[in-house]
Image (cartoon, rainbow, N blue to C red):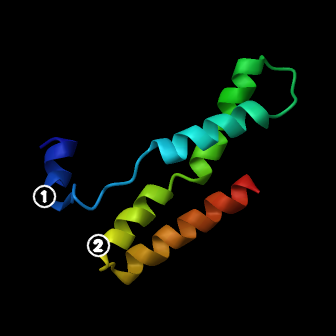
Amino acid sequence: MTYTQFWRPSYMEDKDNFALYYVLMPCAVLAVLIHPSTSHNILNRILWAFCVYLEAVSVLPQLRVMHNTKTVEPFTAHYVFALGEARFLSCA
């Protein structure tokens, strides 16, 4: 059984309507404008900043799906909240 076959019965395509460019574009712009000043190559610094920013907001699509389904198990809600808080604090 492959990964896709395992998760396909529980995937709700109609609820997953988050446009990824709302996450990718701001992260890319921020990475170009705000990146660390180290002795590394400029491209490496920008890509590293992009990864950090993307990791900080990667929970947004999951929150959108949870909002669209209207029924969320408490354990899942607490986990996603803790994950988002940890990513926000790691970015700060």
Find numbered disc 2 in the image and state the secondary structure of the residue it sits on: helix
Q: Is residue 47 left or right of residue 21?
A: right
Q: In the rendered structure, which disc, 2 or 1, sits on the residue that comes first in sequence?
A: 1
- Quadrant for the N terminus in the image: top left
Q: Residue at x 65, y 45 (%)?
A: 53
As drawn, which residue projects farthest toward the top?
Answer: 41
Pinpoint residue 89: horizontal percent, then vertical percent. Answer: 71, 62
Q: Quickly name the residue at label 2.
A: 69
Q: Tell which tag, 2 or 1, sits nearer the viewer.
A: 2
Pinpoint residue 12: horizontal percent, then vertical percent. Answer: 21, 60
Q: Residue at x 65, y 43 (%)?
A: 52
Pinpoint residue 21: horizontal percent, then vertical percent. Answer: 48, 41
Q: Residue at x 70, y 39 (%)?
A: 30
Pinpoint residue 8: horizontal percent, then vertical percent. Answer: 16, 52
Which kind of residue does numbered mark 1 sit on? Pro
Q: Quickly name the residue at label 1.
A: 9
Corner quadrant of residue 31:
top right
